[in-house]
Amino acid sequence: MAKAIMLQGTGSDVGKTVLVAGLCRAAKKRGLKVRPFKPQNMSNNAAVADIPGNNNHGGGEIGRAQWLQAIACGVAPSVHMNPVLLKPQTDVGAQVIVQGKVFGEARARDYQALKGRLMDAVLNSWGKVGEDADLVIVEGAGSPAEINLRSRDIANMGFATRANVPVVLVGDIDRGGVIASVAGTHLILPEEDRRMIVGYLINKFRGDVSLFDDGLKAIEKFTGWRCFGVVPWLKAAARLPSEDSVVLERLVSGGKRALKVAVPMLGRIANFDDLDPLKAEPQVEVVFVPQGKPLPADAGLVVIPGSKSTIGDLLKFRENGWDRDLAMHRKRGGHVVGICGGFQMLGRVVRDPEGIEGSVTEAEGLGLLDIETVMEPEKTVRNVSARSVPFDLPLEGYEIHLGRTTGPDTMRPSAIINGVEDGAVSTDGKVLGTYMHGLFGADGFRGKFLESLSVKGGGIDYRADVEGALDEVAAELEAHLDCDAIFGLAR
């Protein structure tokens, strides 16, 4: 079994995902065979990963973060890197994915009782991930200080103590109160859990790090833990795919550019990293529009992203008045792209006769495409190679969706996926829908698509830019952390 080290945070969104990715890349550069692992994740940004032994070319779902971390390791993603994935569908319930496949649905209270059964799957995957590795870097979820959940925990100390993995605690200085959060975690953890922590690091520091010397002394006084270093604000992290939709609330527009792309922030927005390649374009400004705000009238393109709850988000879309904004956008000659759930919303109607998504079984669509969608229980999960029909250029991406879409506009497909027609295009060519995530990641297609909107684009190797950002993050961690000590404490 490989040696392992685990990063846990004093809270959510402290930067664990990027730190694990950076450490994975740093370990790879040292010649180590390294793998990522996250016992339990909660995100609607999913990726398609290999299911070992599955020969039908289908895949399974994992969190997008573990997909990125696998890239940092230079290996193919596996469902065992994230054995339990929770995909929120409502404020109190989520779809439960176990080792890549749908296990069922659970309300928050029911899920706590389910955790005991899921630990077996977590430990099974843990054994598989480490089989051919020198080092496994584990990412926790939330915080170990949530001691009210400790008895059934599978994501933090519950896993660390069962698997005997030492823990590095991550504190986020950017949000404030980092001394209290690290010292408070030490204070309230039971002794068994406290013993697992071998030290801590401070993340997201801005400015002169020497100004925090007294802070480090205070933390040492309260905890006795060693500090592995203080990580500055990592600018390169902005070029990496984000997993948690909480980051959307903090995105700031990059200033006026040739093309404004408006993206409504759906309540159950999924796979919004589909927009990352557009954000990387110098002439493109991507604006995520929060609920309660109108779609900007000066947008040349509106992209309706994926959704974990198509009908629920469609109803909220209307409540926000975005349907009226979208109709005006079309009258002005604006373009629209719908991806996955967003594609389904563009049709005349979405039906869910079996109540797969919830109690509402039918909703009127936005009517920009002459199609209709019927939800069906079987989920399509696969990586695909495809070809754009309007531009006759190669595409590469993945599908994660429920539902079957039919109608006259599907006679004008947007893509050919594995020899089968996909999506739909309006008669004027300005509304495009597809089930394929990742289409903007195809550099040639993205350039031609932007050119059709009278914008200079392309010339950017998006995947190479992600690789470059991972290298930059790894170099920063090598410069500011004692990586030798962190890797050396793995066991």
Image (tube, rainbow, N blue to C red):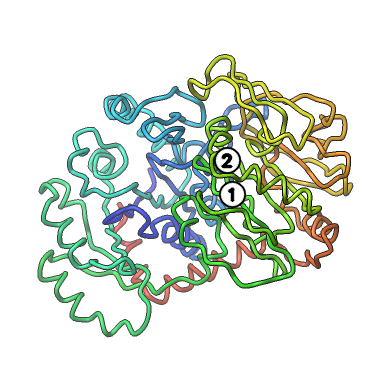
Eyeballing the image, is 85 above or below 262?
above
Q: Is there CB contact under 8 Å for labels 1 and 2? A: yes
Q: Residues within 10 Å of mark 1 (few under 14, many from 20)?
A: many
Q: Residues within 10 Å of mark 2 (few under 14, many from 20)?
A: many
Eyeballing the image, is 472 above or below 316?
below
**Residue at image location 41% in from the left, 41% down from the top:** 41
Q: Type of residue at label 2?
A: Phe
**Residue at image location 32% in from the left, 31% down from the top:** 108
Which picture quadrant has residue 315? top right
State how far apart marks 1 and 2 are (Cα).
Answer: 8 Å
**Residue at image location 82% in from the left, 59% down from the top:** 453
Residue 5 appears at what percent x and percent y? Answer: 33, 53
Residue 422 appears at what percent x and percent y? Answer: 78, 33
The answer to which of 1 and 41 lies nearer the viewer is 41
Provide the secondary structure element on which disc 2 rests. Answer: helix
Q: Earlier in the sequence, mark 1 or mark 2?
A: 1
The answer to which of 168 and 204 lies nearer the viewer is 204
Report whether 191 appears left or right of 413: left
Residue 170 appears at what percent x and percent y? Answer: 30, 61
**Residue at image location 84% in from the left, 61% down from the top:** 451
Report whether 15 appears left or right of 221: right
Q: Quadrant of the N terminus?
A: top left
Label 1 belongs to which residue? 264
Label 2 belongs to which residue? 317
